[in-house]
Every structure is written in C-alpha cells, then in structure tokens.
Image (spheres, helix red, strand yellow):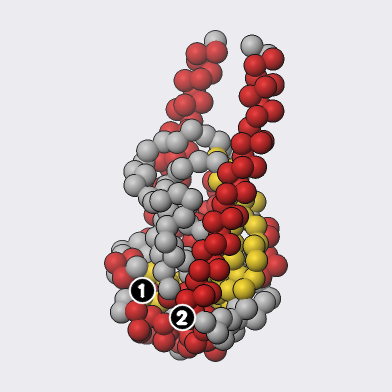
Amino acid sequence: MRSLIRLALACYDYLVIYLGVIWLGVLCLLWAPIALVLYPLLSERRGRALGRRFTMQAFRFYLASLSLSRRFSFDLSALDALRNEPALIIAPNHPSLIDAVMVISRLPNVACVLKNELMNNVFLGAGARLARYIRNIPVRRMVRQAVDDFDSGSHLLLFPEGTRTTQPPLNPFKGSIGLIAHRAGVPVQTVLIETDSPYLGKGWPLFRKPPLPIHYRVRLGRRFDAPSQVQNFMADLQDYFAQEMQQEVTQGHHDAEPARVAKSLHT
C-alpha cells in the first residue's frame, strides 16, 4: 500500500512540474499577440502601465496556480510594503529562474533589466517591450534607460549578480547596480530570497523533477542610500549579502538538527 501511495505521489509531482512549466508558457503566449498589437497603438506611458500591471497579475495567477497543487508554497507578502514606495532599485539574490516572477507578481510598476535574447523571445518579448523593460546591452544605453525610467516613479528590478547564482552563496556582483543608483540618486532595497530547493537554479534542466514540496520565502533586507562612491558601495553591498547568506545557511543547519533528532527517535 505504501509503495502505491509513493508511486501515485511521484506521478502527481511529475504532473505538477510539467504542467507548471507548460502553463507559464501558455499564459505568456496568450498575452504575446495582444501586447504586439497594443505596442504601436498605445502611448509609451499607457503601454508601460498596462504592460507592467498585466504582467504582475499574470505572474500572480501563475504562482497561485502552483500553490493550489500543495507542492509549492510562496511567502511573498514582505514585498507588499514596497508597492507605494517612491522610485528605488530592488536588488535580490538570484538562486532560481523563478525569482523575477515572484518579485514582479507583487509590484504593479516595476521595470526589469532583461538579457537581450529574452527581449526577442517568442514567449516574453512582446510583453516585455510593451512594459518597457530594459535590455542589458549595450551597458551605456541600459544605464541611461534605467535612470530615465525612474521619472515615472517606478521601481527597477536588478539582480546584482547579473545571472543566477553559480558560485554559492553568491556570484561576484556587477557594478551596474551601483552606477544606476548613483546616477539616478535612488536608494537600493535589498531582498533576500530563501528556498529549500535548487530547482531551476543555473544549469537545472527545465523539466527535471526536484524533490517536492518546495518552499519560497522573500524578506526585505537593508536599504542602502544612493551611493556617492560606486566602488565602495558595491563592496558594502556584496559584504552585506554574503553575511545574510551565511546566516541563512547557519540557521538552516540549526533548524534541521531537531528534525534529524526527532526522526531518529521515531525509527
């Protein structure tokens, strides 16, 4: 009987993973032709507002769908405190491909710096262009567009690592976040993304099933004032994240120890 239950649960987990990936693709494809038509028809201001709000709602709906499976859980409520904040840069660590989806799902006016190939992607490109997301190259233009975007009171989602973490706990940070904060004169709000799974980390195959359930939690970290010295700011930012990541690892070991003891007592 237990073997049958384990088999049924494994089949269900595969279904959740595969349908979850497909469902996100379907949502993006449904929006893409609409965004493509609206892009030349709407003014930049209206297109940006509509594109960003729709993306927020679509990503929120997607995460809610995953949560219904009871194999994923998302604690993202801390991000709600940023909704009415003035212009700032949101700087999370980047353990997973789903990180941007989680942050954008809670904020109605956030720009995102995307890799150039994603701006031309059939799934994401049309919606990203309507929302006036920002290409990551060339760097000079990226910085200029990011600075200009703050004029609308928006937020900018920018991962300091530049890509998903490949050298745990953190990759070396890119200096663009400090340069943008300095030129725009905006603060940098750090965000700590915590998860108990390597699912969709760098190099993780899209349809590879991880152990489930998976839990995600987002908490707000320190807010840095707009820097006057970019180099010093980047060193302080990297040190801060490194300390937070180390505390997370240490806390995880402390939390796991009682569970191991309890398990041993029951076996």
Residue 33 seen by the camera: no
Q: Position of residue 84 (x, y in %)?
A: 68, 76
N-terminal of the pair, mark 2 or mark 1, is 1
For the point 36% across and 73% down, the residue is 136
Task: Compare residues 162 and 29 and report the one nearer the observer.
Answer: 162
Q: Position of residue 265 (x, y in %)?
A: 69, 15
What is the C-alpha distance between the residues marked 2 and 1? 14 Å
Please say if the residues under marks 2 and 1 sit with CB atoms less than 8 Å apart: no
Q: Position of residue 173 (x, y in %)?
A: 44, 65
- Give the quarter of the figure containing the C terminus: top right
CA neighbours of label 2 inside 10 A, class few (<14), some (14 to 19), many (20+): many
Residue for badge 1:
136
CA neighbours of label 1 inside 10 A, class few (<14), some (14 to 19), many (20+): many
Residue 183 seen by the camera: yes
Q: Nearer the viewer, mark 2 or mark 1?
A: 2
Q: Secondary structure at mark 2?
A: helix
Marking on residue 14: none
For the point 56% across and 81% down, the residue is 227
Marking on residue 179: 2
For the point 34% across and 47% down, the residue is 203
Q: Secondary structure at mark 1?
A: loop
